[in-house]
Image (cartoon, rainbow, N blue to C red):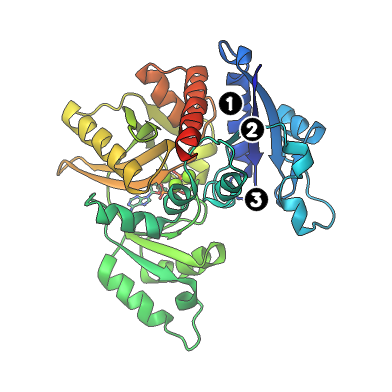
Amino acid sequence: TKLRVGLLFGGCSGEHEVSITSAKAIANALSIDPNPSKYEVVPIYIEKNGVWHRGTEAEAVLESGQPLTVTGEVIPSDRIPNPATVKDIDLWFPILHGPNGEDGTVQGMLTLMQVPYVGSGVLGSAVGMDKIAMKMAFSQAGIPQVRYQAVRRSQVWSNPCIFPKLCDDLDAALGYPCFVKPANLGSSVGISKVRSRQELETALDAAATYDRRIIVEAGVEARELECAVLGNDYPKASVVGEISYNSDFYDYETKYTDGKANLMIPAPIDTAIASKVRDMAIEAFLAVDAAGLARVDFFYIEKTGEVLLNEINTLPGFTALSMYPQLWSATGVSFPELVNQLIELALERHTQAA
Ligand code: ATP
Ligand code: MG
Ligand code: MG
Ligand code: MG
């Protein structure tokens, strides 16, 4: 009998659309040999307002690639699955990017249900999502990173006003350019590259609209490398890829507009650098207790030969054109085989947890 895979997509996050595209690619991979003889896909869609759908609506979203338009009042219990409609799901494949899905929330619910699911558990997801917690874990593991400072929304929107002092301190500690980021997001949403005190103030205010937790990082001039990790307790690293673009930085528009970014796989770098990146990718994966999959992003400062860890993404973009599956394909693991291995890793982890 086939394993019934609940493909969980959409989600209450700014990366909703990306998730639909990722889910489409995974559903397609599950329908390519040898997967269809092993798995039956059940699409389960989370609307932007958090409401769960199984059946016709979910299938229609997957088919059309268009989100459902949010209508009507939502009661909190619509934001969890109706037990009766998911009792036949054998294994869950969450492909949700950003808050409410990549951050341990959905993983917590699946853990409570005691069902196998693809990817990191609660801790790995949560630490991997929050850039402040992530950087603390990396720094504890001795992995080199850019200089940074954590900021709370309450400091930005402070009363009495400590905001000028905060900006003075950031200014002195990090200089310009610096990057201001909401701590719990992805796809560069809410991120600003800042070149002056005036821009710093505007950027902090903008980031505060997205998150209570904000991070400000010293800007580096660097090449951008990415490495894909696959496994549980003995994770493996893929070949290294590079991203190039003509924009100011790798922002949302550059990420999702056709032709604006160029992926080079493998990256044209020395084998010694590639091997350092692969080792650091595995260290980063272990430092946050990730599982199954993660894409690890780096800065490579060519002048000095330095490699700095930027971040980990525990549910990276998974469209046919995304870096994660492309890195594995260049390493010899095809897209359908990758999906198959992720499901096997989920089953392995579930068996160990029991
Ligand atoms: P993802 O979509 O990969 O999850 P994200 O939203 O988590 O992205 P980051 O990877 O932290 O965001 O940053 C997005 C981009 O901003 C980087 O790829 C890089 O182009 C630029 N950037 C971020 N931080 C720095 C920095 N400290 N110095 C230079 N460039 C930076
Ligand atoms: Mg990220
Ligand atoms: Mg991300
Ligand atoms: Mg990134």
x and y percentages locating residue 53 in the rendered image: 76, 40
Does residue 335 sit above or below 131 in this rendering?
Answer: above
Give the class, few, some or many, for how many residues have Cα within 10 Å of label 3's Cα (few <14, many ≥20). many
- Amino acid carrying mark 1 in the image: Ile
Q: Quadrant of residue 163?
A: bottom left
The secondary element bearing badge 3 is classed as loop
Q: Is residue 165 above or below residue 182?
A: below
Q: Secondary structure at mark 1?
A: helix
Q: Quadrant of residue 227?
A: top left
Helix, strand or loop under label 2:
strand
Return the residue at label 3: 12
* Residue drawn at (29%, 46%) of the image: 309
| Label 1 environment density (alpha carbons within 10 Å; few <14, some 14–19, many ≥20) | many
Report if the beta carbon of the residue with label 1 is closer than 8 angstroms to ligand 3: no
Give whichever of discs 3 and 1 has the lower sequence position.
3
Can you identify the residue that label 2 sits on?
A: 7
